[in-house]
Image (spheres, rainbow, N blue to C red):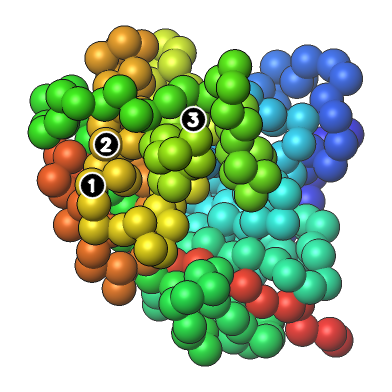
């Protein structure tokens, strides 16, 4: 299942299907070293990697070298790339031909990405870009959390006995999900489908924050997020919450800062296709 690869570095390769047996001890030591290196990177950038490697490792493909520390981690249609010499690793992992999401931490990698991929497009339907999106990563903890609202009776938690999760959000409702209820209709939504709370990490990732266009600027998102953050930070004692937001979305960034979210790092992402040889 694991093999020594003919590269310039020691590479630990690759989980391509479900793990049916424990790692060999030698591989496990290298894998733990890989995790220790990954832990040294900003958690706001690598939170998805940690969650998938902890909770759904059987669905993850990865290749990495330890000297220097480079990696490609693949889950769903998404590929996280380290910022250095990952191109020697590319041939060791399975690639989709189209609709690839590339995520990378260093925009200096962009010229090399353009050599290997094509047809770049935005991840955001209302944020057009011909190359890549720039996301601000934000984090919040109990120390910085400032709710600002006490009247939260219209914010409902899912599953709800009477109100169904709107169809477009159902894929996000497995963890913790809340919606603002107005006239028996959900007009604002926020969820934390990814939660990790173990000896090493304690965080949640918030996604799907949205308010209907005609219902905006009335505090609904603020109230919904307040309730969500209260359960995560206060009730469940999870240490931190992370979210990513398009850097040009000033209104959303200001909303998150009102709650106590603080800007942490930056990550870049793009939809693209693999260049054909």
> What residue do we see at 15% from left, 24% from top?
150
Determine the CA span between mark 2 and mark 1: 6 Å
Q: Earlier in the sequence, mark 3 or mark 1?
A: 3
> What residue do we see at 67% from left, 86% from top?
119
User: Label 1 belongs to which residue?
Assistant: 219
The vertical placement of 264 against 160, above or below, is below
Determine the CA span between mark 3 and mark 1: 18 Å
Residue 126 visible in image: yes
Q: Which quadrant would residue 146 be assigned to in this image?
A: top left
Q: Nearer the viewer, residue 171 or 94?
A: 171
Q: Are marks 2 and 1 in contact (CB under 8 Å)?
A: yes
User: Label 3 belongs to which residue?
Assistant: 177
State the residue lying farthest toward the front.
Answer: 183
Determine the CA span between mark 2 and mark 3: 13 Å
Q: Nearer the viewer, residue 139 or 153?
A: 153
* Element class at badge 2: helix
Q: Are marks 3 and 1 in contact (CB under 8 Å)?
A: no
Q: Nearer the viewer, residue 235 or 29?
A: 235
Q: Which label was assigned to residue 223?
A: 2
Image quadrant containing the N terminus: top right
Q: Residues within 10 Å of mark 1 (few under 14, many from 20)?
A: some
Q: In the picture provided, is 238 more to the left or to the right than 96?
A: left
Query: How far across and down, in percent of the image, does residue 245 sit?
Result: 36, 58
The vertical placement of 197 against 55, above or below, is above
Q: Which quadrant would residue 270 be assigned to in this image?
A: bottom right
């Amino acid at each position: 299942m694991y093999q020594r690869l003919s590269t310039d570095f020691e590479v630990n390769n690759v989980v391509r299907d479900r793990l049916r047996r424990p790692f060999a001890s030698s591989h496990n030591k290298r894998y733990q070293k890989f995790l220790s290196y990954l832990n040294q990177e900003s958690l706001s950038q690598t939170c998805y990697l940690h969650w998938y490697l902890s909770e759904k490792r059987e669905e993850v493909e990865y290749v990495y070298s330890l000297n220097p520390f480079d990696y490609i981690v693949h889950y769903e249609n998404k590929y996280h790339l380290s910022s250095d010499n990952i191109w020697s690793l590319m041939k060791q992992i399975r690639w989709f031909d189209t609709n690839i999401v590339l995520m990378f931490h260093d925009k200096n990698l962009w010229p090399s990405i353009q050599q290997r991929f094509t047809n770049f497009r935005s991840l955001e339907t209302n944020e057009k870009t011909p190359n890549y999106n720039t996301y601000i990563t934000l984090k919040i903890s109990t120390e910085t959390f400032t709710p600002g609202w006490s009247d939260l009776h219209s914010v409902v938690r899912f599953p709800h006995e009477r109100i169904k999760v709107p169809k477009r959000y159902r894929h996000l409702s497995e963890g913790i999900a809340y919606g603002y209820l107005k006239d028996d209709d959900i007009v604002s939504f926020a969820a934390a489908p990814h939660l990790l709370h173990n000896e090493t990490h304690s965080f949640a990732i918030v996604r799907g924050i949205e308010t209907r266009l005609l219902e905006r600027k009335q505090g609904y998102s603020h109230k919904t997020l307040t309730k969500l953050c209260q359960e995560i930070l206060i009730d469940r004692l999870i240490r931190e919450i992370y979210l990513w937001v398009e850097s040009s979305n000033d209104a959303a960034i200001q909303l998150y800062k009102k709650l106590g979210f603080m800007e942490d790092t930056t990550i870049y992402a793009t939809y693209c296709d693999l260049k054909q040889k």
